[in-house]
Amino acid sequence: MATQATAQRRFSFLQIAIALQTLTIFLQAVSAGLLLTSAYGETLHSVGARVMYGASMLYVLAAVLAWKPGGGSPRPVWHASGFLVLASVQVVLGIAHLPSVHLPLGVLMFGLSVLALARR
């Protein structure tokens, strides 16, 4: 019984991590709009980028914690690691001011994150 409760708690942590990542990516889209229309948009987008990157790292941690002790499928770890790679590319593209690639990648990341959330 305790093992099942522990497994459920890990699953919940993974679900929360994916939801947090999805929310932060969505908020990045909102702050990107503010970036174009207000003086404080750049600050919000910059801070949001750091929070989104942290959420991607939390997703990796949650996936590893859900996989390793239970011996389940490593697939969530691969998905989370892929998101961290995409987040890293997204940060580099943002710093390089390449919106023609940065924006579509952000949309792709949001879609994939929503899909990952729906699968959990």
Image: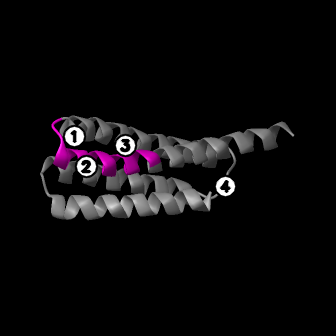
The mark that comes first in sequence, 4 or 3, is 3
Quarter containing the N terminus: top right
User: Do residues under tags 1 and 2 come within 8 Å of each other at their CB atoms?
Assistant: yes
Q: Nearer the viewer, mark 2 or mark 3?
A: 2
Lower position in the chain sequence, tag 3 or tag 1: 1
- Secondary structure beneath disc 4? loop
Tell me what residue is drawn at x 17 percent, y 49 percent.
36
Q: How far apart are marks 1 and 2 (CA)?
A: 7 Å
Question: Viewer-nearest of labels 4 and 3?
Answer: 3
- In the picture of the structure, the residue carrying the numbered disc 1 is 41
- Depth check, mark 3 against mark 1: the one in front is 1
Closer to the observer: label 1 or label 4? 1
**Measured Cα–Cα span from mark 2 to mark 4:** 38 Å
Q: Return the residue at label 2.
A: 32
Q: What element carries label 3?
A: helix
Q: Name the residue under label 3.
A: 52
What whole-number distance in Å separates the C-alpha atoms at marks 1 and 4?
A: 42 Å
Q: Which residues lie in the magenta part?
A: 23-39
Which callout, 2 or 3, points at the residue further toward the start of the chain?
A: 2
Q: Which mark is residue 72?
A: 4
Nearer the observer: mark 2 or 4; the answer is 2
37 sits to left or right of 47? left
Residue 54 lies in the magenta-colored region:
no
Can residue 91 be seen at all in this image of the molecule?
Answer: yes
Instruction: Tell me where residue 31 appears, x and y as whole percent.
Output: 28, 45
C-alpha gap between disc 2 and disc 3: 13 Å
